[in-house]
Image (tube, rainbow, N blue to C red):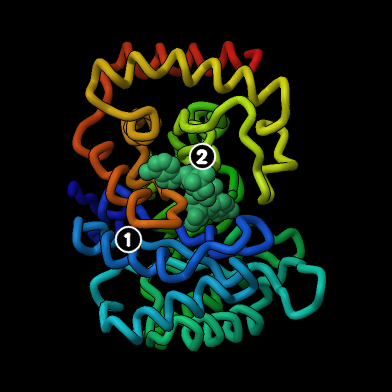
Amino acid sequence: MNYAQLGASDLRVSRICFGCWQLSPNFWGNVPLALWEDALQAALDIGVNFIDTANAYGNGYAEESLGAWFQKSGRRDDFVLATKFYWNFDQDSRHPDTRHDRILEDCEASLRRLQTDRIDLYQVHAFDPLTIPEEVAAAIKQLQSDGKVRWFGVSNLNAEQMRMYARYIDIVSLQPIYNVIERDVEKNELPYCQAQNIGVISYSPLMRGLLTGKYDRDQVFDDARATHPLFQQPAFGRMLDAMDELRPIADDLGLTVAQLSIRWNLTHPAITAPIVGIKNRDHIESIIKAADDVLPVDVWHRMAGIVSRAAGG
Ligand SMILES: NC(=O)c1ccc[n+]([C@@H]2O[C@H](COP(=O)([O-])OP(=O)(O)OC[C@H]3O[C@@H](n4cnc5c(N)ncnc54)[C@H](OP(=O)(O)O)[C@@H]3O)[C@@H](O)[C@H]2O)c1
C-alpha cells in the first residue's frame, strides 16, 4: 500500500480511504454488519489505515457500528479516523447546525459513539450559511486544545469558502465530490488546495458504483440510486456504453474498470486519497491495486473524453 502525508498535518494516510456512508440504511439499504466488519479487518490486513465517516451517516449508526468494532477488535489506534459534523438530526427532518456550542456537543456525541477519546480529522460536512466561519473555527480550536480533535478539514466547500475559513484556522483537507464524471473542482478548488498544501480526499470516486462497469443494462437498484439521475435511462445506458469503451483501456493496463477509475482519480496531483464506499471484503481488497501507480497522461485525457461524450459534454 502507498501512503501520503495529509496536507500539512502529521497524519500519514493510505492512498485509499475506507468510506462508511454505506452504513446509512436510508441511502444504501441494509448492509450486513458482519460483512462490513470483515471488510474493516481486511482493510487493516492490506495496509489501509484511513477511514472516513460522519455523525449523520445513518443518524449515528455508522459511528456506533465503528465504535463497537473498535471496542471488540482493539484496533482503534491502527486507523487515522475522520468524521464530520454539520447535520442536526435530533428532529425528524435534518438541518445544518454549526453554532459553537452545537459543535462541542456533536463532538462529544461522536466520541461516545466511536468509543474513542480523539478524532484525528474533524470535518465540517458543508458550508453553513447561518454561522460565520470564525465561530466554527473557535469551537474547533477549543476541541483541539482539549485534545479531542487533532486536525480540521472541510467538505463540499468552494475555494472562496475555504479562504474564509483559512483566515481563522488551519485547514488540512478538503473532501469534495470528484470522479471522471464530476470534475467541477478541477477549476478552482484543486488548484487552491495544491497552492495551500491542503490534502484532498475525493468522495464518490466510483460515482456510487457506476464507474465500476459492473452493472448490466437491466440492473435494478433498491437503494437511493433508484432515483439518482445518472442511474435513470437514457443516462444510465449511455454511461454503461462509456464503461464498455473504458474496458479495453483497463485490460491493457491489467486493471478492472473500477481500479482504472480510482487510478484516474489518483493521477490528479492534488488528490491524496479517494474515499471508496465499502460494503464487504472484496470491495476493499480488490481496489487497492489502483493505488500502485498513476495513469499515463494521454490515457487520463482519453478516459475523460469518453465519459464526457457519454454525458453529452
Ligand atoms: N462529504 C460528503 O458529502 C460525502 C458524500 C458522499 C460520500 N462521501 C464519502 O465517500 C465515500 C464513497 O462515496 P460513495 O459512497 O458515494 O460512492 P463510491 O465509492 O463512488 O461507490 C461506492 C459503491 O461502489 C461499489 N464498489 C466499491 N468498491 C468496489 C470494488 N472494489 N469493486 C466493485 N464495486 C465496488 C459498491 O457498489 P454496490 O453497492 O453496487 O456493490 C459501492 O456501494 C462514502 O462512503 C463516504 O465516506 C462523502
Q: List x then y, in percent, for residue 226.
A: 71, 42
The kind of residue on which mark 2 rests is Gly
Q: Which residue is mark 2?
A: 209
The quarter of the picture where residue 278 lies is bottom left
* Residue occupying image coordinates x 33% and y 85%: 72
Q: Nearer the viewer, residue 12 or 72?
A: 72
Quadrant placement of the C terminus = top right
Q: Position of residue 82 (x, y in %)?
A: 42, 66
Label whose residue precedes the other's in the sequence (2 or 1) = 1
The 10 Å Cα crowd at callout 2, few under 14, some 14 to 19, many 20 or more, is some
Residue drawn at (81%, 74%) of the image: 92
Disc 2 from disc 1: Cα separation: 20 Å
Residue under label 1, please give it: 50
Tag 1: amino acid? Phe
Q: Is residue 102 above or below residue 293?
A: below
The answer to whether the beta carbon of the residue marked 2 is less than 8 Å from any atom of ligand 1 is: yes
Q: Residue at x 23, y 59 (%)?
A: 12
The x and y percentages for residue 309 are 58, 11
